[in-house]
Image: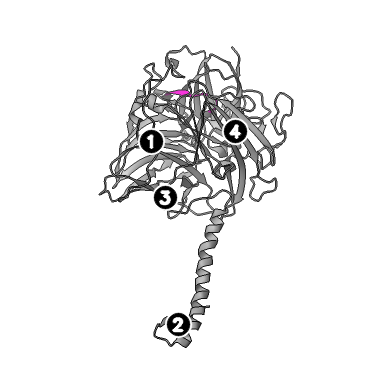
Amino acid sequence: MLPSRKCLHMTEKPAFFSACARSYGFIFLIVLVAIILPAASSAQQTCPRSPVGSVVQDPPALYSHGGKLVADLTYQTELDEDGTARFCFKTSDGRQSPTLYLNPGDELVLRVKNLVPPDAPGLPQMKMAPDMDVSAASICGATVMTPSSVNIHYHGTNVSPSCHSDEVIHTLINSGDSFEYRLKFPADEPPGLYWYHPHVHGISEAAVQGGATGLIVIGGIQNVQPLVAGLPQRLLVVRDKELPGEPPPPAPGYNLSLNYVPVSFPAYTPAIINVHAHEQQFWRLANTAADSILDIALLYDGSPQKLEVVALDGVPTGSQDGTRLGKLVTVDHVRVPPAGRVEFIMTTPPRDARNAVLITRRVNTGPDGDNDPARPLAILKVGEEPAPVPLPTVPAFQSLTKRQRFEGLEQAKVSAFRKLYFSEDSDDHFFITVDGQKPKMFSPDDPPSIVTHQGAVEEWTIENRSKENHEFHIHQLHFLLERVNDILVPPAKRQFLDTVDVPFWSGKGPYPSVTVRLDFRGADIGDFVYHCHILEHEDGGMMAIIRVLNR
């Protein structure tokens, strides 16, 4: 109901005014409902997402106290506007994907309850048989996998792979069930950025793309790299998501988001990061995307900016050489594979910068790979007075840390040399195979493909025999990147990682490869996994078990 044309003129007689008031009152009611309903709908979302083009907010935070962090999380789901499932971990007071702040030596007690209904709409189709080995030795939670099952992997952390710790092979939390994690972080855990996510084989991609990812910060990085002490700190979480329908090229393989702010095809409307002008800040970015490779850069009016890398994959760069001090690595862009993290010092733009933007550059993932085009992630907006909300700052330097976790690995004697390779077949089956063994899709009931012992130092060469990129990741430890395509990497790139990109094979010539040195000198023994961290590939079979025996 629209007001009559006479109601648009204030010179009309009073007799008409009451009718006009009724008409405008009706419109006001419609407008009020239109405003309130979306707000109410947003408030009632189970796994809320930020509007396109909104300001980036830091994730909520939970802190350890007295050497322990105790928290309750629920695992929940809902359909988004495209009809695809969102997933999330929420605290008892409703905060989504909290960052877990701990210190080396702390204990994490995480009580998880799965509130995803067994018949929830949008649950993923399982890419493996649900039957699992139910022998007493392997049971950890439920015994049968379902499309609503969940568990949690504490990515990059050097904690035990035992049940109720960072065990993902047999741990299942089914709908309605509760499960308690008790993780003890080693006293020499490198200070830096880690993350957590579901890791049920066959449905991990859907859960991660649904948004069920969060950060872990191990404190003390200022004691290894004092240059970050006192700097404003910003946490950035990149996630990906399938595009609705079947959009034609040049659509990306997946849309991205930054701290839950969507950056979607075709507009690629970036998120907004409010900053002070010309200020040093410490940015800690995690690629928690299931499948998307990033190549991060900062452009101010088209000019690449200097990024001073402080840490990669949770380990301060250059810190494991015995000096116990990190060394900055200066770059103007940095490749971040799915699951990778980069922490760097940057300088915000001057007030007269016209276009300051955080981008991911184009990544060529091979003829069989996904399209990862260049696109913006966020615009850096220099705030007028009053200044933007202050960021938390890194604590002050206290003292140099004690012996570093991987110290001396580069000089240690290698006890075993192995070759592994990624491969695929025409039926979209994915394999990671020890050279000499037969390619086989992963099953939780598999025997270990590799057996080693505590105290070993091993050198693995991982080849890519397929025409798309793969991302090598191993649980429970880090590795030292030594060579790429059998060429020794320069010292600035010879860093400790838990995930590394292995580029695609062109179809002729030698297979692309990386050679890494793995450190089994820590306390972790038992069975855990290594796999490609493009989760479509991991769910499709590209994973295997390693067993570390007590010395």
Please tell me which residue lies in front, 492 or 544.
Answer: 492
Instruction: Answer with mark 4 or mark 3, whichever residue precedes in sequence.
Output: 3
Mark 4 falls on what kind of element?
strand
Residue 110 has which mark?
A: 4
Given the image, on which type of amino acid does mark 1 rest? Thr
Residue at the right extreme, as displayed: 135
Q: Residues within 10 Å of mark 2 (few under 14, many from 20)?
A: some
Mark number, residue 55: 3
> Quick check: is 468 in the magenta stretch?
no
Whether residue 252 is visible: no
- What residue did someone put label 1 on? 393
Specify the quadrant of the image occupied by residue 44: bottom right
Real-space CA distance between mark 4 and mark 1, rounded to the nearest whole angstrom: 26 Å
Name the quarter where the C terminus is drawn: top right
In the image, taking residue 357 as reference, residue 79 lies left or right, namely right
Q: Identity of the amino acid at label 2?
A: Cys
Between disc 1 and disc 2, whose residue precedes? 2
Q: Residue 541 shows which numbered tag?
A: none
Q: Residue at x 69, y 41 (%)?
A: 175
The earlier-in-sequence mark between 4 and 2 is 2
The type of residue carrying mark 4 is Leu
Asked which secondary structure carries label 3, the reply is loop
Q: Magenta stretch? A: 474-482
